[in-house]
Image (spheres, rainbow, N blue to C red):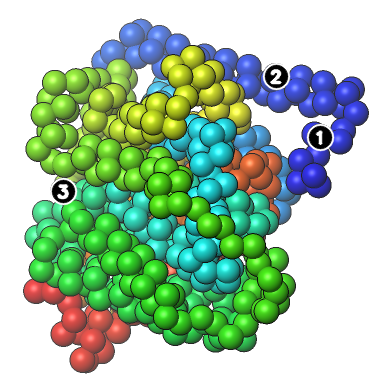
């Protein structure tokens, strides 16, 4: 009851709160519409404005320019973590800061800044929110039908110990959802399952974010690496091999790390055999798949292998001490055993099996290409597409920045998840009217998350089209022989600011390759470091945190979640930098770079 303040608040404050939040929605939507109208109007009235070229040191001193470039991120994260402002207000503050820096410090024309913000907000709504909405819709359906309770009880039958439940769900099952769909799916689903097992909401959100690291580079059927190949021209298999080698250590240590954070070092050592089984299985499967079979099924095979190995191992091994979700010792306590029939357990897991099957089928290249050709609409963003030039040394020669909005409404992962949710709902006995009502109830419940993600993606796009991201990247590139270490942090910064390993690879892939050639290290290594370092930024990316808070019913507590994971993110990113530095300069680690 304490986690839901509205349940005990007087009527008057509730009404006032609804009025304030309702006003914020109206103001935000009105602002986006005004920005869109203004951008289109300015474009029409000045069609011959010509190209605008990015400048990466407008202040004449790189460290001053870098400070200004960092302001939007500082405002966004600081407002959530330090001032504890709700995410949608923090995101709007960050957006206003980004626009101010872009226009006043970096001299970006007003019409370009407003158009970039509108473009980013549109991308936040589709496809990102279009993934979150159907996932939470499916979860709500399982709660409504009682299937989620049976799912919880079936997991309890596998193991009573919360540390092993965390390992099975947040790490192994989360990796499966990352491999099939990516975006916020693993955090949303796994966070909800952990809460059903008794984990505290904020704890479930933070642990799900922390566990969702190792598979991110290969998530969404390998799309982040495909994007990296697209901007660098480097061999796809070489990138896949090198990224998997960099991440071997993290596949091994992240399961130990997550359980340590949750239960403490001593409690982690008590279940080390199970953790070792999970980490070795995942690391081996990911490395072998990435090295010999390509990247599409890497995370899926690694996660399913880990789930199977864990379930089998736990049939023969039990910890001496059993902890519940509150970290209380319940060894020897008589626990209620749930004697569910195989059919009932299957029915409880059925919605998630349907989700996995449909999303997997949705991602089959042949089917995806067929549907994409028949249904996808692409729009050049008026007044922005090819109106901005990215300049050396970020790219080899001046290059016009495309701005194409892709409405792949049929092939989008979110559409696949929605189809899966509808199928699962019908199989659970819900009628079309009930499904319709539940869908719109879910949409209403995540309204603030939608606003937040739209504003955050607007920040990312203003940052990208203005060149603030490149200014930050170039600051790291000044580190000379230490660049392999700091180059990994560029990837971390890219994902932390955009919420996507794919976006980070697109933004900084070419910069990594050019800088690597200048300092004499492997371009494949540094491009791979961008993606591997980026996975550690996923847990502090604002969109990820908002998904976690929304799925765990902890919206408004984003600052607390950010503080929970921030130092872990920095520490793991720095460790990636150390690994990359060794592979760049120190034998025999240099031989691990794929050639």
| 221 and 234: which is toward the camera | 221
Of marks 1 and 2, the one in the foreground? 1
Secondary structure under the numbered disc 1 in the rendered image: helix
Of marks 3 and 1, the one in the foreground? 1
- The quarter holding residue 400 reads top left
| 590 and 327: which is toward the camera | 327
Position of residue 389 measured from the top left corner of the image (x, y, whole percent): 26, 37
Secondary structure under the numbered disc 3 in the rendered image: helix
What residue appears at the point 46 percent right and 35 percent down from the top-left corner? 138
Q: Which mark is residue 569?
A: none
Where is mark 3, residue-wise? Answer: 230
Q: Quadrant of the N terminus?
A: top right
Q: Return the disc, 1 or 2, that comes first in the chain's sequence.
A: 1
- The quarter holding residue 304 reads bottom left
Q: Is residue 35 visible?
A: no
| 442 and 17: which is toward the camera | 442
Q: Which mark is residue 23?
A: 2
Asked if labels 1 and 3 touch by Cβ distance under 8 angstroms, the answer is no
Position of residue 388 measured from the top left corner of the image (x, y, whole percent): 29, 32
């Amino acid at each position: 009851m304490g986690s839901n303040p509205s349940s005990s608040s007087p009527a008057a404050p509730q009404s006032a709160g609804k009025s304030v939040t309702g006003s914020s929605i109206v103001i935000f939507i009105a602002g986006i519409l005004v920005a869109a109208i203004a951008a289109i109007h300015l474009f029409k009235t000045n069609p011959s404005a010509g190209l605008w070229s990015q400048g990466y040191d407008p202040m004449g001193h790189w460290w001053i320019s870098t400070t200004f470039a960092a302001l939007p991120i500082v405002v966004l994260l600081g407002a959530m973590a330090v001032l504890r402002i709700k995410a949608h207000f923090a995101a709007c503050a960050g957006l206003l800061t980004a626009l101010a820096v872009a226009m006043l410090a970096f001299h970006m024309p007003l019409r370009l800044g407003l158009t970039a913000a509108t473009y980013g907000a549109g991308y936040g709504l589709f496809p990102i929110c279009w993934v979150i909405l159907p996932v939470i819709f499916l979860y709500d359906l399982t709660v409504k039908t009682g299937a989620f309770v049976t799912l919880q009880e079936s997991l309890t039958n596998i193991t009573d110990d919360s540390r092993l439940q965390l390992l099975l769900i947040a790490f192994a099952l989360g990796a499966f959802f990352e491999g099939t769909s990516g975006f916020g799916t693993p955090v949303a689903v796994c966070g909800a399952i952990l809460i059903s097992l008794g984990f505290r909401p904020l704890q479930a959100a933070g642990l799900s974010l922390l566990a969702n690291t190792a598979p991110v580079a290969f998530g969404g059927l390998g799309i982040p690496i495909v994007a990296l190949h697209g901007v660098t021209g480097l061999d796809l298999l070489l990138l896949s091999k090198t990224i998997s080698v960099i991440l071997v250590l993290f596949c091994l240590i992240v399961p130990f790390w997550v359980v340590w954070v949750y239960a403490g070092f001593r409690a982690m050592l008590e279940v080390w055999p199970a953790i070792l089984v999970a980490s070795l299985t995942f690391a081996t499967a990911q490395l072998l798949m990435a090295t010999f079979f390509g990247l599409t099924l890497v995370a899926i095979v690694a996660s399913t292998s880990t789930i199977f190995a864990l379930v089998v191992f736990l049939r023969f091994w039990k910890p001496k001490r059993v902890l519940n979700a509150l970290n209380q010792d319940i060894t020897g306590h008589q626990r209620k055993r749930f004697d569910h029939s195989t059919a009932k357990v299957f029915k409880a897991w059925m919605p998630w099996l349907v989700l996995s099957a449909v999303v997997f089928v949705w991602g089959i290249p042949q089917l995806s290409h067929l549907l994409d050709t028949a249904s996808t609409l692409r729009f050049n963003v008026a007044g922005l597409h090819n109106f901005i030039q990215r300049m050396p040394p970020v790219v080899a020669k001046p290059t016009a920045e495309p701005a194409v909005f892709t409405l792949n409404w049929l092939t989008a992962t979110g559409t696949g998840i929605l189809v899966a949710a509808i199928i699962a709902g019908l199989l659970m006995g819900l009628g079309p009217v009930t499904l319709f009502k539940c869908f719109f109830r879910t949409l209403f419940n995540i309204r603030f998350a939608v606003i937040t993600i739209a504003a955050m993606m607007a920040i990312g796009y203003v940052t990208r089209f203005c060149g603030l991201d490149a200014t930050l990247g170039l600051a790291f590139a000044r580190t000379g022989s230490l660049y392999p270490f700091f180059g990994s942090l560029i990837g971390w910064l890219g994902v932390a600011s955009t919420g996507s390993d794919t976006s980070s690879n697109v933004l900084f892939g070419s910069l990594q390759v050019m800088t690597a050639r200048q300092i004499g290290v492997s371009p494949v290594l540094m491009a791979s470091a961008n993606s591997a370092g980026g996975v550690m930024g996923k847990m502090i990316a604002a969109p990820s945190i908002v998904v976690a808070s929304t799925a765990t019913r902890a919206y408004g507590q984003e600052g607390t979640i950010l503080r929970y994971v921030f130092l872990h993110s920095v520490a793991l990113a720095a460790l990636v930098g150390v690994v990359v530095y060794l592979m760049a300069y120190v034998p025999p680690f240099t031989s691990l770079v794929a050639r």
